[in-house]
Image (cartoon, rainbow, N blue to C red):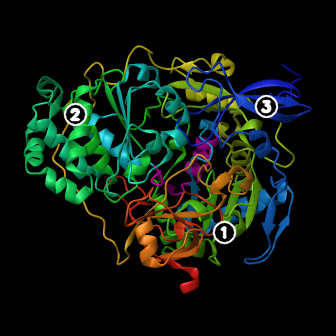
């Protein structure tokens, strides 16, 4: 403990904090503070799940918090295309409020688009701004850039986005990471399954998790639903279906079984590239090693048939009778946060027009009704698909762009006004995970750095300047958190002292056989394997996550990236030979949307016809080529349904 600062921070001591990144682990952390600076950030050994260590991305948080490139003053641009210059907060906020007021007077609030995602997952940081957008009657964006196809698939199938909880992994006998690389992107789970007897990875790319697995199944991208049909066929042929479970807890089995019987293992091998012996072997492992957990990654559903594939994997768990079994079943995410809605939707007098955030480039270039864009918790110039179209839209002469961020990001470089943001170490917030069920308050470790202001502070100030006098805009961080918690059974004071488990640790999702679907059962249905058009280019291009990058965060810290500081493109030796590509050579990677230069890494980690590059970097990156069309469910992103051509730069 140390002397208290204005925001409840300490000038010296150790403060319990929580990582706010868009990551399932939501690590408990301890911030060491001296003389008003964070000198060290380490894992909290008392956190029941994250257990005292943090991932490679977040080690050295203190360097990021006090990075010399942190913005310390607002920046404004006096004319489109002119240079950004320093301004004080009054000038910057008056400029934003004045332009917003003028746009609303002439075009209405629907001409101002707020654009955000989960650059900060805190409830205050991510949800408090909704109050202003509702009061202004602005349109809204969804959450399509990440995980919505999978979420929609689970909702249709079982009625909730829930699955096995981490405290039950000690019971798991078989763990299958399906389209997921937990060793790099869910590191505490990887630690918890260390003693699971059999680990399987299903992934077109030989990820670090696949390298350490007992079995790596390597289907062609986007063919996982066909692979599941093959596994189901083996189950049917061997009478491994849990018929009692099917009778008691499902609907639609007969139609699904008829579809499965129409599939041969020869056809499965032909479509997926997975040998029939491997299909049989995986099916047998899953049948004989119970409980078995099928853990689905978000990467699987970033395809045109993403919802189809997630639902297929989940239905396999149902046929095996494993949904509702501790340590078994299927896990996509545990996302059913039962907090109060703090967005104040009643302030809205006109229903919002919803924009798909994946299609930002199209909206900005095709819909001139949009006159302003307010970006926070996001960096769309780097992270959005169809990057060149997004940049063209951001550069529109008549578009007023505001960016609130810690750094001068790719998007901020297009802004008319840039507002310096606080880090998690400078604000109080409420953090939840979409994997484990521990909730915790992030305590501020230090006062806001010079010139930095939180999302809540900025939104409240804009509301005041726009003449909105509702009391909700005058709430403190603590007020907002207490309102979110009211009636939930969670105690504010307890949450400030450490993580609190929200649910019964002995129970697991669906162990009561209750499924909140229209039928009250798991709703099975027949499915196919939907192909992805190649758009006239020969190589399927996927862009997975790595432990070194978190979205585009840390994109200005190359020392954090290690070997991934080089923008590698993994290409199979046979493909490299055919294209005349040497290891380490600069490559032109292109399609009809754009092109990017990457560096060849010739490797058997990829299968023939597949190229892979980790995401997301600042500047030109693979999103120059990625599509902005929606998936089969929820309009989700389809980053991995992408085809490109590849050639040495020297030959282009």
**Tag 1 residue:** 400
Instruction: Indicate the secondary structure of the residue bearing disc 2.
Output: helix
Whole-Å distance between the Cαs marked 3 and 1? Answer: 35 Å
Q: Mark 3: give few (<14), some (14-19) or many (20+) Cα within 10 Å.
A: many
Q: Are marks 3 and 1 in contact (CB under 8 Å)?
A: no
Tell me the distance, in whole angstroms, between the alpha carbons under discs 2 and 3: 52 Å
Left-right relation of 241 to 141: left
Magenta segment boundaries in residue numbering: 125-146
Q: Which residue is mark 2?
A: 284
| Residue 154 x/y as whole percent | 32, 40
Disc 1 or 2, which lies upstream in sequence?
2
Q: Which residue is mark 3?
A: 445
Q: Earlier in the sequence, mark 2 or mark 3?
A: 2
Q: Residue at x 35, y 24 (%)?
A: 173
Cα–Cα gap, marks 1 and 2: 59 Å
Instruction: Give the residue displayed 38% in from the left and 63% down from the top.
Output: 641
Q: Is residue 464 magenta?
A: no
- Depicted 50 relative to depicted 134: above or below: above
Q: How many marks?
A: 3
For this rendering, which residue is in front, 162 or 404? 162
Q: Earlier in the sequence, mark 3 or mark 1?
A: 1
Picture coordinates of residue 287, whole percent (x, y):
22, 29
Quarter holding the C terminus is bottom right
Closest to the observer, 358 or 134? 358
Task: Write the residue at 30% across / 65% down.
Answer: 532
């Amino acid at each position: 403990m140390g002397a208290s600062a204005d925001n409840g921070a300490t000038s010296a001591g150790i403060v319990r904090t929580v990582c706010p990144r868009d990551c399932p682990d939501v690590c408990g952390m301890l911030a060491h503070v001296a003389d008003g600076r964070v000198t060290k950030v380490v894992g909290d050994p008392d956190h029941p799940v994250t257990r005292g260590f943090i991932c490679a991305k977040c080690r050295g948080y203190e360097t990021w918090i006090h990075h010399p490139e942190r913005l310390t003053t607002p920046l404004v641009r006096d004319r489109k295309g002119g240079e950004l210059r320093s301004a004080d907060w009054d000038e910057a906020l008056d400029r934003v409020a004045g332009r917003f007021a003028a746009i609303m007077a002439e075009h209405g609030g629907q001409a101002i688009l707020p654009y955000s995602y989960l650059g900060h997952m805190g409830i205050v940081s991510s949800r408090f701004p909704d109050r202003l957008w509702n009061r202004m009657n602005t349109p809204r964006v969804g959450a399509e850039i990440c995980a919505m196809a999978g979420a929609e698939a689970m909702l249709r199938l079982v009625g909730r986005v829930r699955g096995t909880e981490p405290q039950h992994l000690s019971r798991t006998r078989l763990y299958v990471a399906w389209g997921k690389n937990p060793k790099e992107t869910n590191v505490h789970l990887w630690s918890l399954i260390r003693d699971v007897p059999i680990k399987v990875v299903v992934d077109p790319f030989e990820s670090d998790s696949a390298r350490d697995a007992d079995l790596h199944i390597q289907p062609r991208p986007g063919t996982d639903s066909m692979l599941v049909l093959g596994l189901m066929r083996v189950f049917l042929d061997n009478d491994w279906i849990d018929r009692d479970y099917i009778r008691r807890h499902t609907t639609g089995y007969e139609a699904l079984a008829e579809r499965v019987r129409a599939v041969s293992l020869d056809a499965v091998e032909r479509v997926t590239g997975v040998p029939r012996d491997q299909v049989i072997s995986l099916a047998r492992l899953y049948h004989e090693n119970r409980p078995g957990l099928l853990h689905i990654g978000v990467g699987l559903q970033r395809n045109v048939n993403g919802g189809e594939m997630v639902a297929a994997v989940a239905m396999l768990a149902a046929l095996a009778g494993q949904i509702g079994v501790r340590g078994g079943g299927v896990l996509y995410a545990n996302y059913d946060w039962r907090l109060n809605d703090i967005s104040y939707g009643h302030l809205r007098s006109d229903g919002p027009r919803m924009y798909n955030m994946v299609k930002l480039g199209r909206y900005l270039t095709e819909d001139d009704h949009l006159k302003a864009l307010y970006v926070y918790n996001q960096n769309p110039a780097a992270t959005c698909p169809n990057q060149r179209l997004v940049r063209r839209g951001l550069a529109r002469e008549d578009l007023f762009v505001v960016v609130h961020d810690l750094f001068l990001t790719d998007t901020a470089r297009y802004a008319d006004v840039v507002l310096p943001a606080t880090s998690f170490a400078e604000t109080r917030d409420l953090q939840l995970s979409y994997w484990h069920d521990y909730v915790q308050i992030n305590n501020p470790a230090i006062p806001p750095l010079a010139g930095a202001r939180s999302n809540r502070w900025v939104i409240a100030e804009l509301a005041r300047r726009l003449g909105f006098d509702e009391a909700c805009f005058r709430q403190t961080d603590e007020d907002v958190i207490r309102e979110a918690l009211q009636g939930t059974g969670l105690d504010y004071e307890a949450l400030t002292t450490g993580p609190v488990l929200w649910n019964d640790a002995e129970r697991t999702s669906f162990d009561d056989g209750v499924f909140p679907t229209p039928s009250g059962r798991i709703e099975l249905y027949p499915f196919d394997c939907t192909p992805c058009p190649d758009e006239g280019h020969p190589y399927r291009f996927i862009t997975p996550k790595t432990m070194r990058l978190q979205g585009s965060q840390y994109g200005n810290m190359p020392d954090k990236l290690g070997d991934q500081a080089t923008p590698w493109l993994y290409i199979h030796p046979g493909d490299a030979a055919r294209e005349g590509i040497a290891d380490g050579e600069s490559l032109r990677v292109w399609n009809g949307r754009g092109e990017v230069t990457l560096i060849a890494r010739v490797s058997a980690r990829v299968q023939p016809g597949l190229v892979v590059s980790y995401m997301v970097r600042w500047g030109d990156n693979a999103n120059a080529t990625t599509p902005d069309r929606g998936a089969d469910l929820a309009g989700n992103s389809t980053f991995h349904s992408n085809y490109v051509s590849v050639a040495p730069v020297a030959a282009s």
